[in-house]
Image: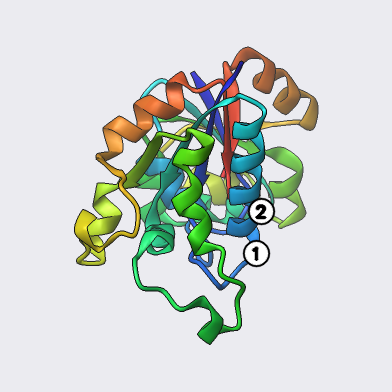
Amino acid sequence: MKHICVVFRHAPFGATSSREGIDFALLSASFEQQLCLVFTDEAVLHLLADQQPELAGSKDYVSVFKAFDLYDIEHVLVCETSLQRFGLTLEDLAISAQLASSTVITEQLQQADEVLVF
Amino acid sequence: MILHHVQTSALNDNALAVCLRFCAPQDSIVLSSDAVIALLDQQWLNKLKPFNIMALADDVAARGLTEKHLAASSIAINLISMNEFVAQSLTHQKVITW
């Protein structure tokens, strides 16, 4: 079993890379890999509640985030610097996530067996 | 000890900025293709200074950048070949491509 860390740094809707990252994370979790997801920069917007993806012509993959604990993905880290930069707090998010400072995320990246960035 | 790999220009993609945010002191950074452009920008050079910085020699030469251009930088940049890049990826614990 590997400890895989998936980092998201792109905004929702703009690019498809985030969607691929989410699929990769869910697939890895279903193969009993230990997952840690990190949302940083504009990717923190993925977790905002009350999104209406259809208005942007995008399929609703935001609801997939609610399935994280179904896949026992417990470690969902949100970059504290990025949240503050956009004036957001944990209460604005659709799912429960752990507020993480840059040093905490750096430590996660050091410990992980593999890190992939989407 | 992680080898961070950045291949997009810092002027139109946040990869280098995010990499630097999560880069530990003992880590190395290798710049390839458009990412080497950051080596001409003093603001980025200042941020790169604390780390072991490498760049793919071919990508630097391809863009007509020479020792003269890089000499202006205040930090040591070792230009490496593709083989050396492979070797570096083996000596580090893992590679993160941002």
Number of residue marks: 2
Name the kind of residue labelled 1 in the image.
Thr
Q: Nearer the viewer, residue A62 or B89?
A: A62
The chain identifier of the residue carrying mark 2 reads A
Q: Position of residue A17 (x, y in %)?
A: 63, 58
Name the kind of residue labelled 2 in the image.
Glu
Residue farthest bottom in this picture: A55
Is the residue B35 above or below the residue B76 in the image?
Answer: below
- The crowding category of the residue bearing disc 2, from other C-alpha atoms within 10 Å (few below 14, some 14 to 19, many at least 20), is few
Q: Position of residue B11 (x, y in %)?
A: 50, 65
Residue under the image location 38 percent in, 57 percent down: A41
- Mark 1 → mark 2, Cα distance in angstroms: 7 Å
Q: Nearer the viewer, residue A97 or B91?
A: A97
The chain identifier of the residue carrying mark 1 reads A
Residue under the image location 67 percent in, 22 percent down: B89
Instruction: Quadrant for the N terminus of chain A, please.
Output: top right
Which residue carries the number 1 mark? A16
Q: Is residue A32 visible?
A: yes
Q: Position of residue B39 (x, y in %)?
A: 51, 49
Q: Secondary structure at mark 2?
A: helix
Q: Is residue B50 visible?
A: no
Q: Secondary structure at mark 1?
A: loop
- For residue B24, what is the image quadrant? top left
Determine contact: label 1, label 2, CB under 8 Å: yes
- The crowding category of the residue bearing disc 1, from other C-alpha atoms within 10 Å (few below 14, some 14 to 19, many at least 20), is few
Which residue carries the number 2 mark? A20
- State left or right for residue A50 relative to residue A90: right
Residue under the image location 62 percent in, 58 percent down: A19
Residue farthest right in this picture: B83
Q: Position of residue B57 (x, y in %)?
A: 71, 39
